[in-house]
Amino acid sequence: MNVHPTRHSTRSHLFASLTAYLQDLQESGLDGIPVELTTPAMTDIAPQRSVAPKPATGAVMGDRQSTPEKHETLEQIKKDLGECQRCKPGATRKNLVFGAGNPKARLVFVGEGPGADEDAQGEPFVGEAGIMLNRIIVAMGLKREDVYICNVVKCQPPQNRSPESDEVSPCMPFLLRQLASIKPEVIVALGTSTAQTLLQTKAPISKLRGKFHDFHGIPLMPTYHPSDLLRTGGNSDSFWSVWDDMIQVLQLLKLPVPDKNRKK
């Protein structure tokens, strides 16, 4: 895998992708695009669809120092999201679940959406699936506060069903803005729905996992959802498939790979 963008280029790529995403939504006639995301204030952050001349290599550092890039914080994005009512689950949720963790994390885990425990507490992955995700993070030699955890959608859909397309669309710009703020080096997509949504594919997770994919310039590793591991057990084939995926993540981040032996 040769894709390993700098944080500067990743951020610019994400902002460009966000602008294009919003424009495509508007052109398709979709209702409900957040007004604040289409105002001039947003264009101050996200570059328009124009190709700027490439600076000479020797001038890059000077350009960065003389024209510092504006940085949108997670708190600003959360404030902009507000008490969101942009889709149906906004009317039935208890708490909006924005995300949690290190705002400068090198690694981001993205799930599908909040469950009942997350809806009650307002924090992602705090139920049984969250306990399993914590086990994976610790097994990687990391702590939960080292990474950032969020979801594609910020509100629990009714009856804990999968998010529908008209619920994903209003949330996706906020996810892109979160990633642009964090500037992670790697994203892990947890589960079939998350991977298919982010990669715009119908391929099963069994075909997507095990290799990196490009998501707006960031290497993305799809893997099984922690809830899948709860159903199959902690020493299942799917558990060790997830571990194999995490080994690749650690190697790309140039972090030590803990020695784990499969139990017989």
Image: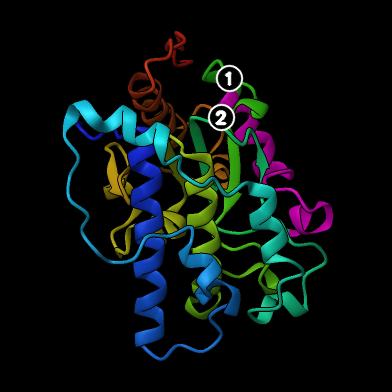
Q: Residue reaching furthest front?
A: 66
SS at badge 1: loop
Is residue 163 visible in the rendered image? The answer is: no
Of the numbered discs 1 and 2, the one sitting upstream in the chain is 1
Compared to residue 154, the image places residue 205 above or below, namely above
Q: Is residue 132 magenta?
A: yes
Give coordinates of residue 176: x percent, y percent: 47, 56
Q: Which residue is mark 1?
A: 142
Q: Which residues are magenta?
A: 116-137
- Picture residue at 20% right of the left edge, 59% below the top: 51
Instruction: Characterize the local packing of mark 2: few (<14), some (14-19) or many (20 or more) Cα atoms within 10 angstroms.
Output: some
Kind of residue indicated by mark 1 = Leu
Label the magenta part by its dominant secondary structure: helix
* Residue 109 x/y as whole percent: 52, 41
158 with respect to 137 (left or right): right
Image coords of residue 24 (percent x, y): 34, 78
Give whichever of 15, 179 is nearer the camera: 15
Q: Residues within 10 Å of mark 1 (few under 14, many from 20)?
A: some
State yes or no: residue 121 in magenta. yes
Q: Where is mark 2, residue-wise? A: 234
Front-lying residue, 50 or 91: 50
Q: Is residue 206 above or below residue 94?
A: above
Nearer to us: label 1 or label 2: 1
